Image: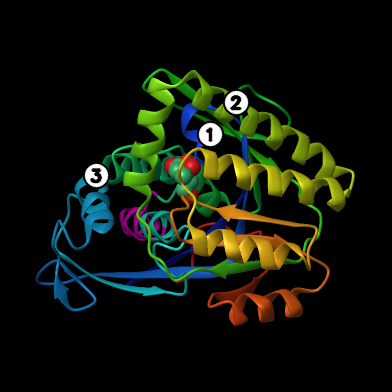
Amino acid sequence: MVVCSAPGKLILFGEHAVVFGEPALSMAVNLRIRTEAEVSSKFSVNDQDLQKQKHSYVYECIENVWKGEPLSLRIDSGIPSAAGMGSSAAVTVSTLGALLRLKGEFDPVLIAKKGFEIEYEVQGSASPIDTTTTTHGSGILVAREARNNLLWVIRKDGKEWYLHECDLPEMKLVVGDTGIRSRTGPLVAKVRSYVEESSFARDVVSEIGQITLQAVEALSDGDFVSVGALMIRNHNLLSVLGVGHPKLDNLVRVASDLSYGAKTTGAGGGGSMIALTDDPLEVAKVIRENGGKAYIVKYEKRGVIVEC
Ligand code: MEV
């Protein structure tokens, strides 16, 4: 029997724009998904027969890397699903980790690359930011070209993503989950059609990329006031791209009053927001008072690991 786990993630800047090759910044957080795998008489997930529709990510992991005997898989998730915290990337990466470990081929570069292909396949489109963050852990900067601390390069459909480890300062972050479940694939498709038909939307996407690079500078200077202002700007531009939601806007507004800044994190359309603050307990309280679920999260250095 093998057990692997992988962390959730938060996108700090640049979601959606990163799908078009723009820079983005993310970090792994201290919520994890565990996959336990052992050889069995039939394929199953949490005691149910494996089904392509129901267990889409796990099914694709098996199709892609496992040619052996049937497996019983047990998946234990500490990451809320469809809430912008990377649960689908983490389930994919922890499952790939477990399967590859059983084969004696556990390799983070292979896991990041296969994980991206699987997310792309299941969602219909994706960037490699979520799967790389959960594979490697720590902070991740996606850029258009190689910089210091390059991890790997991922190419697809004429696009190239240069994925780097990025040192992040200590930050107090609160996640506010609206409780409105949103699927990444349809939101990415919606933004894509807008970008294809409108030069205004293309300008918005490129401005989000510039904001990300400014935020990387501000974070390395420890200038949280500028980071907060960039978060608000990034949030507003995501709304312009059509991935906002009134409940998300409300949580961003009330949290901003007690924070350096706040913004949508992940695909939007519901899902979650994040706030950067000196007072996480007060921010968590105001999020709860406004109908959200609050999580005070910590930076996680570890990516996918073999637990036993
Ligand atoms: C979802 O966590 C982030 C998006 O940018 C999609 C992706 O990059 O694959 C919305």
Q: CA distance from mark 1 to mark 3?
A: 28 Å
- Which quadrant: the N terminus? bottom left
Q: List x then y, in percent, for residue 252.
A: 64, 61
Along the viewing direction, whichever of 164 and 178 lies nearer the viewer = 178
- Residue type highlighted by circle 3: Asn
Residue 182: image quadrant is bottom left
The kind of secondary structure element at disc 1 is helix
Label 2 or label 1, whichever comes before in sequence order? 1
Along the viewing direction, whichever of 291 and 221 lies nearer the viewer = 291
Q: Considering only vertical position in the picture, is 305 above or below 201?
A: below
- Which quadrant: the C terminus? bottom left
Q: List x then y, in percent, for residue 204.
A: 57, 29
Magenta region:
94-105
Respond yes or no on whether mark 1 lies under 8 Å from ligand 1: yes
- Residue type highlighted by circle 1: Ala
Instruction: Check whether the beta carbons of the residues at disc 2 and disc 1 lie within 8 A of each other.
Output: yes
The kind of secondary structure element at disc 2 is helix
Residue 121 visible in the current orientation: yes
Label 1 or label 3, whichever comes before in sequence order? 1
Q: Is residue 215 left or right of residue 21?
A: right
Q: Considering only vertical position in the picture, is 201 above or below 300?
A: above
Give the residue displayed 16% in from the left and 72% down from the top: 40
Q: CA distance from mark 2 to mark 1?
A: 7 Å
Q: CA distance from mark 2 to mark 3?
A: 34 Å
Residue underneath mark 3: 64
Residue 299 visible in the current orientation: no
Instruction: Check whether the beta carbons of the residues at disc 1 and disc 3 lie within 8 A of each other.
Output: no
Report the disc number at residue 17.
Answer: 1
Residue underneath mark 2: 206
